[in-house]
Image (cartoon, helix red, strand yellow):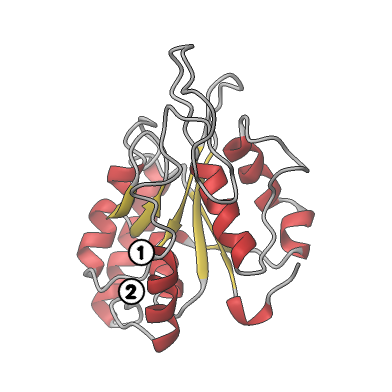
Amino acid sequence: MRKLYQALGLIALLLHTGLLGSAEMAPEAQRLAKDLDGMNVDRLWLSRHRVHWKTGEPYGPAPTDGKSHTHCSAFVAAFCYRHGLYILRPPEHSTTFLANAQYDWLQSDAGQKAGWQPVLGPMEAQRLANQGMVVVAAFKESDPKKHGHIAIVRPSTKSDSAILAEGPQIIQAGMDNYQSASLQEGFKHHRGAWPTGQIRFFSHDLKSNKP
């Protein structure tokens, strides 16, 4: 926790000196935002349904086992698939516990070879998204029997102070599907993930797509 507070203090200093800023949005970011909205995540990849991972369309009868059946990782995989980016997905890994697996994969040599780079914190994540980069926010549950979570950082003109307080703006599927929400809101079902700094960010340049 002390390290987190030290990091936040450093960010605040950089903001004060004018070395950081996230609100400016490049034309590429406007196109990225349009593409993200075009995924229609508010009506597809819905929880408590079986869905096709590439389209988010439901199929078959709804599960009756009482489980949440969320599709955050499938949504992220589908967006990347449509834009020629590879992130761990079926058939290389099933959709079961895929978010946890994507978290590990993004940090591995395989993730870096596929073009993903680690991002230093929420301020940088928002800044890169505002440049038109694809940025994902990922969290892995320590309990292997629990699902992690992953979302895409969407371009936003929210203030630096808002990013420090509630994280960058995201689009996600999950227990709750959001076209646009704060990272804090999107990851609320994973207690402590945002306050304790356990969420990791990774970026990929759309201009250097790799299959």
Report the disc number at residue 10.
1
Looking at the image, the residue that sits furthest to the top is: 65
Which residue matches tag 2? 14
Q: Secondary structure at mark 1?
A: helix
Nearest the viewer among 26 and 109 is 26
Amino acid type of disc 2?
Leu
Q: Residue at x 40, y 60 (%)?
A: 122
Residue at 70% x, 68% y is 115
Toward which corner of the image does residue 174 lie, by quadrant?
Answer: top left
Could you tell me the amino acid type at mark 1? Leu
The residue shown at (67%, 51%) is 107
> Badge 2 local density, few (<14 within 10 Å), some, or many (20+)?
few
Q: Give the vertical position of 13 relative to 51 (above or below).
A: below
Q: Does 35 sit left or right of 142 as displayed?
A: left
Place of residue 44 in the rendered image (x, y in percent of width and height, measured from the top left): 42, 46
| Image position of 10 (left or right of 83) | left
